[in-house]
Image: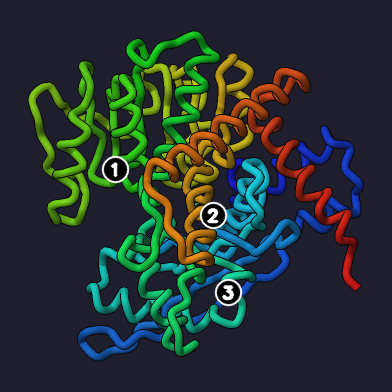
Amino acid sequence: MEHGGVFEMALEQLGSTAKLLKMDPNTLRVLGCTERELTVHLPVVMDDGHIEVFEGHRVQHSSARGPCKGGIRYHQDVTLDEVKALSMWMTWKCAVVNIPYGGAKGGIKVDPSKLSFEEVRRLTRRYTVAIMPIIGPHRDIPAPDVNTNAETMGWIMDTVSMYQGSTVLDIVTGKSIELGGSLGRREATGRGVMFVTLELLNRMNLTPAKTRIAVQGFGNVGSVSADLLKKAGCNIQAISDISGAYYCEKGLPISDMIAYCSTGRGKTLEGFSAPGVSKIDPKELFELDVDILVPAALEKQINVENAEKIKAKAVVEGANGPTTPEAERLLIKKGKYVVPDILANAGGVVVSYFEWVQSIQSFFWDEDGVNANLKKVIVSSFDAVWDTAQREKQDLRHAAMMIAVSRVAKALEIRGIFP
Ligand code: GLU
């Protein structure tokens, strides 16, 4: 599997969970497939007048527990295989935190940093129309993911609304506050990472003040996780993004780094410097003597090549699918914890759910209410996963998967197979 696609990795996780659950092979056959895969080709008139055609996908893995839900990513390495895996992980993620959704994901194979603002907007509108036959507020609700944000969601919402002839707030989540988005949504994934990390530290008898953390990735998830963990008292010693890795033994100045990234220059840390901060090899970030490692970038970053060298006592998966099953087995054998993506980064979709509810009701919550409800969901889900792991003598991923997969299987069983 190590060199296979990520969907194979998702199937391996499902297969080993099904064994533990002694799952009916009929149910496994259904859950091992996606419900629907749509590939679209998107012609876009570029600023210089020539036409470029981009490939995009929207995959719905399961609607057994409710409308499909999941983000849309723009990345040059997007493939159908990857989007399929990500859609399956969304199904488990929504199930483990018990929100009434199934799983979906979308993606366009494009490096948006190479396109102008207007080109990205035209591409987004064309993609929206191309997937419009299968999305909808009670069918499939997109959200931001890698390289997409509130602005992208606003364009999707506007495009659907133009066709419908009225404003359709509940078609996407992760919208700007001005367009009916939820307070706290932008920070929600990082806030969830912070909550699970603090819960884990508690179980490990560590205090935030004694905790050193390295974070791979400084996008929405990595930057907010680092910021909130620092505010909780942890020492963030290393951060990396596409420009390289930055290290400071006494702790990085996270808010300065966030401010630096927001001032243009391609929105990366390229050129960032501060007293005590040195640049290290991004590979070294994984090998640092820290307590917690937070991969918050892309899939398969922790693999057989670097797993043996990881010194951190625990990995908290801010990204989706950052650890290959083989690497995870190595880490577990060494007594390390891996808090799985479907729990660790579920904060985003939990507040997406709150946003969807607010959009449907046109009744909006204050930020304290959003954050308090998020904390309740994440902490109780963490407790349930931890207790299941203890009871079943399993690692945290298998415990989370056992809870999630059995919820989806149960829904499927109750509904029965149509017709
Ligand atoms: N893209 C995020 C994720 O991977 C959020 C999905 C959503 O809010 O629907 O969980």
* Horizontal side of residue 133 vs 31, given as left or right: left
Which residue lies under the disc numbered 2?
A: 353
Identify residue type, mark 3: Ile
Quadrant of the image occupied by residue 227: top left
Could you give the CA–CA distance between mark 1 and mark 3, rounded to whole angstroms? 32 Å
Helix, strand or loop status at disc 1: strand
**Label 1 or label 2, whichever comes before in sequence order:** 1
Which residue lies under the disc numbered 3?
A: 135
CB of mark 1 within 8 Å of CB of mark 2? no
Residue occupying the far front of the picture: 363
Residue 388 screen position, x and y as percent? 72, 25
Q: Choose between 198 and 19: the one closer to the eye.
A: 198
- Label 1 crowd bin: few (<14), some (14–19), many (20+), radius 10 Å: many
Queried on whether the Cβ of the residue with tag 2 lies below 8 angstroms from ligand 1, the answer reads: yes
Could you give the CA–CA distance between mark 1 and mark 2, rounded to whole angstroms? 29 Å
123 vs 6: above or below: below
* Horizontal side of residue 49 vs 29, given as left or right: left
* Horizontal side of residue 46 vs 391, given as left or right: left
In the image, what residue occupies the spot 40% across and 12% down? 207
Quadrant of the image occupied by residue 279: top left
Identify residue type, mark 1: Asp
Which residue lies under the disc numbered 1?
A: 241
295 vs 152: above or below: above
Could you give the CA–CA distance between mark 2 and mark 3, rounded to whole angstroms? 16 Å
Which of discs 1 and 3 lies nearer the camera? The answer is 3
CB of mark 1 within 8 Å of CB of mark 3? no
Quarter holding the C terminus is: bottom right
Helix, strand or loop status at disc 2: helix
**Label 2 or label 3, whichever comes before in sequence order:** 3
Q: Choose between 13 and 308: the one closer to the eye.
A: 13
Helix, strand or loop status at disc 3: loop
Which of discs 1 and 2 lies nearer the camera? The answer is 2
